[in-house]
Image (cartoon, rainbow, N blue to C red):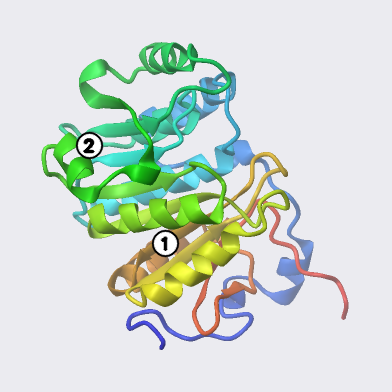
Amino acid sequence: MHAAGAPRRGPGYAVSLMSGKQAKAATGMSVEGVKSGLVEVDRYLDGGYATVVGMSSRFAAAVTCGLMRIQTELGVKGPVAEIGTFEGRFFIAMAHALEDGETALGIDLFDWPNPEVIDRFEANCAKHGVPAEKRITWRADSRTMKPEDFLAKLGGERVRLFHVDGEHSRHALTRDLELATAVLTDGGVIVLDDMLHPGYPTLMVAVQDYLQRHPEMVVLCIIDRETIVAATKFVICQAAWFKRYEEKLLEAYKDNVWPLGADFEPHWCLVLSLDTRLADIV
């Protein structure tokens, strides 16, 4: 069944943003030119992001935090949460995108590659301007976490953005997706890391199964990878919010729209990339 609010579109639905010649000529653009539109976030992306050990791309961080800015403009409020915080690279960017009084929750087993990773996470947060009162560090296993326990950790507040970068197995991603969905606020979004990664091909199966179980949820956009390490992310939103978010993303990242979009059968969504070229076959 086609989710309400998420229109069916054919190939090239975004091509009106650029002519065919422009699309073919568009080359890889500099990641430094992609901004979130938030001063504190962009300062961190330009000056500190690459110094924190991690794998999430700067491009994805800019777009994700830009989406948080859009949420704020649309009146969507609440904490952010992350499964798989590691040393804090992506977490710190999201924390800087929060409004006053909002909190960032970082969940990890904090046992890899060694137990000292939690100390490096805390030190990175302090170094890059995320004070203790703005963050919650939770050493826990998301695979066994119940929504009521999660919400209790946040004082009952529901999440506006949930970044999932946990164990890369179908079973674990399935559990993490169900947890994230259960604790989202109205207008909340889920961001999934390492999608379409050649090392984890079955994760896409978990996502497709999830979308079939949850027709009220749709893929809002695909954030293309920078490299095989800085991999692709999927952004999932409630279908009722799709049009509002899509319009704002098109406005904010029009230079990064790959014209053909992505087909989720029957739903189509945006693809945002640093390389928006089309094959030169005509």
Q: Which residue is mark 2?
A: 99
**41 to 169, vertically: above or below:** above
Percent x, y for residue 104?
Answer: 29, 33
Percent x, y for residue 42?
Answer: 45, 32
Report how far apart the C-alphas of labels 1 and 2 lie in the structure: 22 Å
Quarter of the picture holding the C terminus: bottom right
Q: Is residue 202 left or right of residue 188?
A: right
**31 to 208, vertically: above or below:** above
Q: Residue at x 28, y 74 (%)?
A: 240
Quarter assignment of residue 226: top right
- Looking at the image, which is closer to me, 254 or 146? 146
Q: In this rendering, does residue 45 appear at all?
A: yes
Mark 2 residue type? Glu
Q: Residue at x 39, y 79 (%)?
A: 6
Q: Which residue is mark 1?
A: 236
The label nearer to you, 1 versus 2, is 1
Q: Residue at x 76, y 54 (%)?
A: 27
**276 to 48, vertically: above or below:** below
Mark 1 residue type? Ile
Crowd class of label 2 (few under 14; some 14 to 19; many from 20; radius 10 Å): some
Quarter of the picture holding the N terminus: bottom left
- Looking at the image, which is closer to me, 17 or 246? 246
Label 2: element kind:
loop
Q: Residue furthest left?
A: 155
Q: Is residue 238 left or right of residue 258?
A: left
Label 1: element kind:
strand
Q: Residue furthest front?
A: 144
Q: Which mark is residue 121?
A: none
Of callouts 1 and 2, the N-terminal one: 2
Q: Residue at x 20, y 35 (%)?
A: 102
